[in-house]
Amino acid sequence: MYDAIVVGARCAGAPTALLLARAGYRVLLLDKSAYGSDTLSTHLIHQPGVAALARWGLLEQVRASGCPPIESALYEVADIHIEGCARGVAGQRAAFAPRRHVLDALLVDAATGAGAEFRDRCRVTELLRDDTGRVVGVVGRQSERTFTEQARLVIGADGMRSAVARLTGAPYTVRDPRLTCAYYTYWQDVPAGLELYERPGGWVATVPTHDDATLVLAYFPQSRFAEVRTDARRAYREQIRSTAPALHERLCGATPVERLRGTGDQQNFFRQPTGPGWVLVGDAAHHKDSITARGISDTFQGVEALVAALAGTLGGDPARLDTALARYAEECGGALTPGYEATLGVARLDPHEQRLSLLRAVQSDDELTAIYLDMVAGIASASALYTPRLLALL
């Protein structure tokens, strides 16, 4: 029997397995995809997530992979131009945006190096339950083979469309409409940092990543998805031209190095994250629009909260384990709600005059700019911006 079976081996599951294995637990890590495969992502790890990688001893491996640090940010909307550096957290001022086939493999390697057992191309099809209904393991398929494994805890780290959430019947506790659809590809020889451009009905972002490539993302209102997908390449280029004209000029003559990718399924929700013998972490528990690129950093925060809550609980009394899981659920919901609400505000793609007035004050002051960029990164709350300095400028 395993202490924990972790379903999903990307940014939620692999670090969960890593930290549990380091704590001495026997862990089985499963993923339906092949090891080192790619996935849809904004790639961006804000400074809180970078600090987590540093705590886990993995940041230098990310650097060594050739992923460039992102040490400043630019944001333009209406007549406003904000440019500067976040103050950072835990000594980390730079963000990183590794390709997911690099990051996810690095995390899996760290987990297996710590003693976790990993199986890829495995699909969980059922959950095992005891006579009380408590989850005690999984049934899955790997190629043509069916397997059954038991554990004290099953952890669903398998994303927005979580099989564990479906099989447990985990209800939504908060659910909001989809607000945007997004398309992106990678461009070579288009130097850029973290750049954010906004207008009513449009949002464009650039993120530098591996191999001297720049990820360029374009966001549209969800109401336009059916129209946009009929000619996504044309709509993508037009959104860049109308939202970020200077960036559009830099792209002229350049060639995308990969196919255009996109999604119209950017769900916004919280699920009930725990039950007898099971727990959800990462996008399985909570998902929001990718426009603020907070997913990876928030997932790392949730992973650390879960592992801290589980300390000393996987080898004994199930009631003690359930109490720990309830504490994790309460802590994560409270910690993630402000960022969720802020993300929905941005994803409405409607920069209202009150926010523009605030941003005009921010752009005139280096200290306020740093605090604002901390907010973008999820380091500071909106209340941190309302200093006497800001109030004197409004």
Image: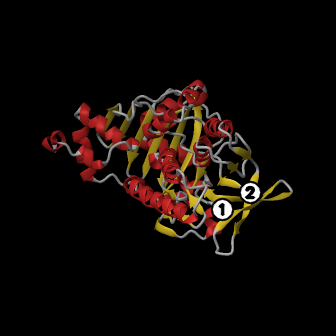
Crowd around label 1: few <14 · some 14–19 · many ≥20 (10 Å): many
Residue 53 position (above or below residue 322): above
Q: Residue at x 33, y 51 (%)?
A: 351
| Most foreground residue, 15 or 242 | 15
Towards the viewer: 115 or 368:
115
305, above or below 101, in the image: below
- Image quadrant for the N terminus? bottom right
Picture residue at 58% right of the left edge, 67% below the top: 276
Residue, far right? 144
Nearest to the observer: residue 39 or residue 271: 271
Q: In this rendering, would 290 be left or right of 379?
A: right
* Mark 1 vs 2, N-terminal side: 2
> Which residue in the protein does label 1 denote?
163
Q: Is residue 294 visible?
A: yes
Q: Quadrant of the C terminus?
A: top left
| Distance from Cα at disc 1 to Cα at disc 2 | 9 Å
- The residue sitting at 34% across, 38% down in the picture is 373
Question: Looking at the rendering, which quadrant does residue 111 occupy?
Answer: top right
Q: Where residue 287 appears, x then y in whole percent?
A: 51, 56
* Horizontal relation, residue 117 to residue 55: left or right: right
Percent from the top left, x then y, of residue 199? 38, 47
Residue at 51%, 66% (x, y): give it. Answer: 272
- Which residue type carries mark 1? Ala
Dot 1 lies on which element? helix
The total number of labels drawn is: 2
For badge 2, the amino acid type reads Arg
Which residue lies under the disc numbered 2?
123
Q: Are marks 1 and 2 in contact (CB under 8 Å)?
A: yes
